[in-house]
């Protein structure tokens, strides 16, 4: 098994409970940590045997483009899409979605939600 991480994926998106957030948008940062079978790719040095990082990024980008009230919902969609895309390699995944400078009373650098999933 191996650990694959995509760190600090910055995406401007339109998530939030307030209409203004969904209209104006905000900066989000996504972290993805994957536990996957990397043994074949380690032997062959062939991209077709690897869990493709670009595909992971594309999934994150696609799901972040769909407006949601809650970042929990976004993180859950990303997890489900990753498991659907990589049915044979992916064993576990953790996704953190952070909203930068959320509209709260007071200064908050970011609000984050982390969800994890294991293959059954």
Image (tube, helix red, strand yellow):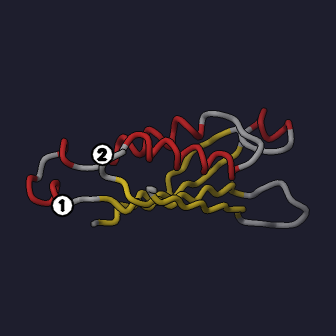
Residue 111 is tagged as none
Q: Quadrant of residue 97?
A: bottom right
Most extreme residue toward the right is 105
Look at 44% across and 61% down and name the residue there: 33
In the rendered structure, which disc, 1 or 2, sits on the residue that comes first in sequence? 1
Look at 44% across and 56% down and name the residue there: 119
- Which quarter of the rendering shows the N terminus? bottom left
Give the SS element for disc 2. loop
Give the SS element for disc 1. helix
Q: CA distance from mark 1 to mark 2?
A: 14 Å
- Which quarter of the rendering shows the C terminus? bottom left
Q: Name the one closer to the observer, 26 or 68.
A: 68
| Residue, disc 2 | 52
Q: Position of residue 81 (x, y in %)?
A: 49, 41
| Residue, disc 1 | 39
**Left or right of 60: which side holds 56?**
left
């Amino acid at each position: 098994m191996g650990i694959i991480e995509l760190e600090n994926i910055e995406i401007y998106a339109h998530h939030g409970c307030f209409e203004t957030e969904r209209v104006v948008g905000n900066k989000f940062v996504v972290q993805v940590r994957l536990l996957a079978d990397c043994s074949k790719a380690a032997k062959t040095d062939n991209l077709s045997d690897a869990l493709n990082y670009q595909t992971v990024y594309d999934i994150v980008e696609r799901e972040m483009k769909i407006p949601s009230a809650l970042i929990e919902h976004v993180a859950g969609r990303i997890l489900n899409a990753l498991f659907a895309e990589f049915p044979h390699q992916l064993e576990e995944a953790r996704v953190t979605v952070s909203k930068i400078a959320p509209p709260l009373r007071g200064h908050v650098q970011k609000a984050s939600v982390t969800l994890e999933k294991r293959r059954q």
